[in-house]
Every structure is written in structure tokens, then in C-alpha cells.
Amino acid sequence: MSEHEDTLIRLEVETARPPTTRCKRVIAIMEEAARRFPGKVRLVVYEWGAPWPERPTPGFQAYGKDARVPKSFVDGKLVDIGREPLLADVIAAIEESLAQKD
Amino acid sequence: MSRRWRLLRDGITDAHAHFAVEEAILRMVGEGASPPTLRLRQVQRAVFVGVFQNAWDEVNVDYCREHGIKIVRRLSGGGAVYHDLGSFCYSAFFLRDMFPQSDEALYPLFARPIIQTCADFGVTARFHGRNDVLVGERKIYGSAQIALYDSFAHSGTFLVNMDFDTLARALTPPASKFRGKTAQSVEERVTSLARELGRDVPVDEVMGVFVRRFRDEFGVELAPGEIADEEQALAQALLQEKYATDEWNLGPRHAYRTFVSTRIPEGTLALSIRMEGGRVREADIQGDILLPNKDAVMALASRWTGLSLSEALATLAEASLPDAIRRALGALLAEAEREDAKHGATPIGQQYDAAR
């Protein structure tokens, strides 16, 4: 992870491995949210049971062994679990995190 | 609650195929394409590893390979368990909203038909802890759960006639698991219906009793059915992509420490590296080399944290080092990389950077 990446707000989603059709929708929602905040957020996708591509946020890790999939997080805060998040909820969570950082 | 459930006895005994079918049903129930299902099955000799476990730590992989014992990582958590045709497992697949109870409360609920089945054979069993059923102080049944969207699977394993000798050889749990406990081995911690009764019990007979108890406990109709074509196709895909692969079943040996050393004219140089998921988590350059900038050389290792060994190797090119040290460190990292290759795969996952 670069220094620049480290300063971005992290969106995290955990899907099934391999992702189901619904998981792909969750990823699409998170990508759409990320696109609305260019240069401010980045998205990491974890797959249930697969090694983490990078160390998740502490908030994600707190749910790491929760056997409900999918899970969506913004800046380590849970947005939704067990279902697709609403795009509006993800955006609101990102705005809240950005406001706290300012 | 839906009163009509499918009863599946598909006869699949291969452990990898079994788990592929399980996940296919879980997914299809969630899609609304499959009915609530009670699936019963036995598997040939296999070790089921919990999703968060490292098979290399928990299982005698070499022994299992030599003796044709398959190793498979399941979707749910919990510990490693040995299976053979002397035990049976069941999985109940349903939409989560069919049961108003909390996830935790489902464990004792689904244990009831097992406890009743034991009683029908004259054995007194009790629910214990979070998800076990014990006879005396020994475990005879364990269970696990997994949720995928609206779909839920509760799975249990009931030991009927178990080959305890193979079980003891196949599993290698860390000694810490037994610290402070009376039982000092897996074999001492578990029992079977046959062991309790002092005679062999046909697994089919136990399954039959269990099905009746399940039906009565939940007040459902169990209609014998088959695996649907769609489920079969999905199971085949999951088998090829996941359950038949070492990558999934064994996982990378991603948490380990390696130590390599070499002797050069300047002295002895050694690398101690802790790897995790194919990345350096901690590295330490040690040795008795006499160099004016020894501290800077030693500090180089701290820059490798989070890098793969190839990336660490690349940093040597730009480091201010005497050539002999650079070559020696390069050789050590290359050796560590060869060691790493034996330990398994690199991390899997997708990463998206919206900033780019």
C-alpha cells in the first residue's frame, strides 16, 4: 500500500468466493459510490475464506469471523451485512467520514 | 415456516464433491431457486478444516496424502474434524427468516433431534457450550452455521462408528488446545454412539431415527428429492474452481518464519523473516559482519515489511551497500523466495482503486 493509498478512505466489501450474482451487485454499488469521490476513497474486496489482500480495517476485522456474507464497510464502519447496501447509505457514510477528516 | 422440505440423500461420498453440492444448495436456496432442504450424507475418509484454520497446522497433511484421506476446507468456522463412513452429517438449508430465533439459539434448537436420537438408542446426551452435544464429557456431535444473503445452512456431524485410530493420526491440533483440559488428545475428547453402546450401529439406522426426530421437532414434511440440474451444474463449477483445489483446501502456508544464512569474507549474514500471505511481516538482518554502516544495513530489513520477497529483492538495487553485502543479501532473499514457493500461493483478492 502506498502512502497516498493510506490516506484514502477505505471502502471494504466481503463477498462469497467466487462472488455470486448478488455479490457482483454489491461490488458494483461500492464501485459506483467510489466513483463519486475520485481521489478520496478506494475499494478493497475480500472473499470469504480467502486470504486478505491487505490488512483490513479494525472495524472490518471485528466482523472477520461473522459467518454472514456480504458485509460492506466505509472507513471501518459497518454499512450493511447479509444484503446489498443502499448506494445512498454508502454515500452518506463516505460523506460522514470525509467530514470527520476535514 | 415452510412445512414442506426436500429430503436429500444423494449418496455423494467424495468430500470435495460433497462441499461443492452444499455450497450450490446454499446459493440456490438464497436465489429462491431451491426449496428448504435437509441433506444427509456420509463421506469417505476426509478431514474437514474450519474456514479460518491453517490446514498445515491442524492436519497431518503427509499422512492424509499417503492414506488417501482428503482434506477439504469448509465454508463455516470451527475446528478440524475427521470423517469416515462411520459418521454422518446433515445440513439444513433454509431462508433465514423461516426461524425467528437468533443465530446462536439455532445451535441448541438443531441439537434437539440429535439428543433425542441418542436417547432412542439409550444414550443420554446433552447440549454443551455453543454448538456441541456431549455424552458424559466427550463430544459426539458438533455443528456449524453459515449465512449467504437470505440463505442459511446449519450443519452437524454425528459420530456413529468412528475409526479413532485414523482420527488420531490425521489430526495434529496444537497442544495449546488441550491446555488445562483433562483430555490430552482429540481421541480422548470425542466418542461415538458405537463406543457408548459397546457395539456397531448401522449408520443408516441412525439416520432414519434422526430424520423422524427432525421431522417431529420442526413439524415439517420431508419429501425425498434429487439434486436439481442447476444445483448440479453450479456444484460442478464450484468443485473445479474451489473445492478440488489445494489453494482452497490447504491454503497458503501463509504464516511462517524462515531463517537463512550465509558466510562471506566479511562474516556471517543471516535473514530471519516472518511471512504472512506471501508478504514480509517482519524481517531482521543478523550477523557478525564488521561494517562502518552496519546499522544502515540492518535497518534495510524494516523497509521490506509489506513487500513480497521479489519486491524486497528489488530494493537492494537502490540501497547503498557494499557489493559483497548486496550480493549476499540478494542470495539470501532468493533462497527465502525458494522457501516461500514451497509454502504456497500468494494472496487472492481483488483491489480497486477509485483514485486512479
Image (cartoon, rainbow, N blue to C red):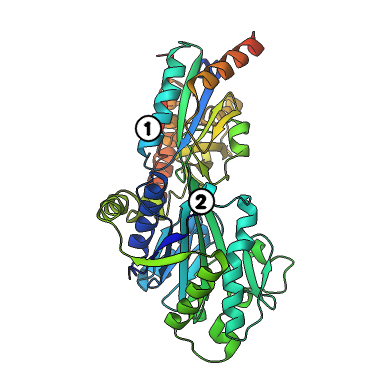
Of all residues, the one furthest to the right in this rendering is: B180
Q: Chain of mark 1?
A: A
Please tell me how crowded label 2 is: few (under 14), some (14-19), or many (20+) other residues with Cα within 10 Å. many
Describe the element under mark 2 as helix, strand or loop.
Answer: strand
User: Neighbour class for label 1 at 10 Å: few (<14), some, many (≥20)?
Assistant: some
Residue B342 in view:
no
Query: Which residue bears the numbered disc 1?
Result: A24
State which quadrant residue B42 falls in: bottom left
Up the image or down, B329 lies above or below B356; here it is below
Q: Position of residue B31 (x, y in %)?
A: 38, 43
| Residue depicted at x 41% and y 77% | B85
Q: CA distance from mark 1 to mark 2?
A: 19 Å
Q: In the rendered structure, are the residues bearing label 1 and label 2 in contact, judged by CB atoms less than 8 Å apart?
A: no
Which residue position is annotated with label 2? Answer: B146
| Of the pair B69 and A93, the residue shown nearer to us | A93
- The image position of residue B54, as x and y in percent, is 50, 54
Camera-side residue: B106 or B61?
B106
Given the image, on which type of amino acid does mark 1 rest? Lys
Q: Work out whether B5 lies above or below B354.
A: below
In the rendered view, would you say B130 is above or below A73? below
Give the chain of mark 2: B
